[in-house]
Image: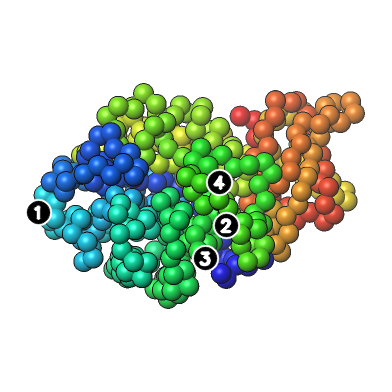
Amino acid sequence: MNHTAIPTKRQQEFLDWEFGVFFHFGIRTFYEGHRDWDGKEMPLSGFCPTDLDCEDWIKTSKEAGAKYAILVCKHHDGFANWPSAYTEYSVKNTPWKNGQGDVVREFTDACRKYDIKVGLYYSPAEFGFNERTDEEYDDYFINQISELLTNYGKIDYLWFDGCGSEDHEYNQDRIVKELRRMQPDMLIFNMWDPDTRWVGNEDGVAPSPNFNYVEDLSFSVQTDRRDALSSKSYLPAECDCKMRQENWFYSDCDEDTIKSLDELMGLYYYSVGRGANLLINIGPDRRGKLPDKDKARLLEFGAEIRRRFQNPIPAQVSWEGNTMVCDFGEITSVNHVVLTEELLSGKELDGFEIMAYEYAHPPVELYHGRTVGHKAICRFETMRVKKLMICFREKHPQITSVSFYRV
């Protein structure tokens, strides 16, 4: 594994993406009530979106402020959303467009039209995969991945799901060599030779503190197993979650579980606000469109982020040792401070306090934090202050920006 002690340029760019949208769409979209690994048959005759509109998926994501999008190309059921030469269980044998359709093509074209980073999800494991020898399955795996990585232009992000692979041995060296050969600039999520890591839950929440230097990785929701890395490595976290409480794929039965705006904003603070990325899933419906209420909530979420953080309060900033002094020039109401840390050096500070000068009184602690990393959103009750002091425990903290808001 080629892990680095300091972040690569691609890892820094990944953190700048901050927020992405996940799209679970495939054969399971058309079969209500199926669950992962239930083994129930889902005949190809059922796959027939009446109005697939990947452009609207991506245009909506762009309007919401997302910088990247990820399409499920093959889930655990083995259905290929592209006309794969290595399985009959794919779009090529469905009624949709008389077998001439290609969801992956429409998705990647839409991402490039709207300047959204292209992410592809692929489940290494699928129903019945243990019926083949390890070598046979590695061949199949690499052949399918090769189709995705050589036929659709530049892929920015490859998302592997460990679910189902807990007890399976892959030829990791062979797989990684092929992946890096075909797309040398691509980011890989969480498995084998990762550039990013799964946060360890599907709730959209990063821990506090959230250090980017880790020694092991969570594997899947089906196990407490953690995979040790060859050395301590810089791997930024991504927090994935569902727009609806119950299902990753579309369902007729859970529209009432769409997350509220307040809940989505809470997840934004617990992910992006803790230096991680947030990845929100929407399951396009059987038309091939975003469900109306999910689409509206995603746009509402993006608008609320902009409302809260597009108008910072000006302040004069100076340093006294390891303390940042922020002078507003007059009594000002503040309830958010947003910090960013320089990442190139590979250092990560640990510990800081935000103190308020309220008129002439002694300073009062408003916020106690641990890590900053790419971004720390520090929220506290509204205070009328003339000055804030941010006191860092580390000497010479590499803070690259600070901004102030009243939300």
What is the CA distance from the residue labelled 1 to the residue labelled 3? 39 Å
Q: Secondary structure at mark 2?
A: strand
Q: Which residue is mark 1?
A: 98
What is the CA distance from the residue labelled 4 to the residue labelled 3? 20 Å
Residue placed most toward the observer, 222 or 19: 222
Q: Secondary structure at mark 1?
A: helix
Q: Quadrant of residue 281?
A: top left
Q: Given this view, does label 1 or label 3 mark the residue nearer the observer?
A: 3
Q: Given this view, does label 4 or label 3 mark the residue nearer the observer?
A: 4
What is the CA distance from the residue labelled 3 to the residue labelled 2? 12 Å
Residue 131 position in % (x across, y down): 30, 59
Residue 206 position in % (x across, y down): 59, 42
* Picture residue at 48% right of the left edge, 44% below the top: 221
Q: Secondary structure at mark 4?
A: loop
Of callouts 1 and 3, which one flags the residue occurring earlier in the amino acid sequence?
A: 1
Residue 227 numbered mark, or none: 2
Of callouts 4 and 3, which one flags the residue occurring earlier in the amino acid sequence?
A: 3
Label 1 crowd bin: few (<14), some (14–19), many (20+), radius 10 Å: few
Q: Which residue is mark 3?
A: 193
Q: Given this view, does label 1 or label 2 mark the residue nearer the observer?
A: 2
Label 3 crowd bin: few (<14), some (14–19), many (20+), radius 10 Å: many
Type of the residue with mark 2: Asp
* Picture residue at 84% right of the left edge, 29% below the top: 364
Residue 285 position in % (x across, y down): 26, 38
Residue 224 numbered mark, or none: 4
Residue placed most toward the observer, 30 or 331: 30
* 384 shown above or below 222: above
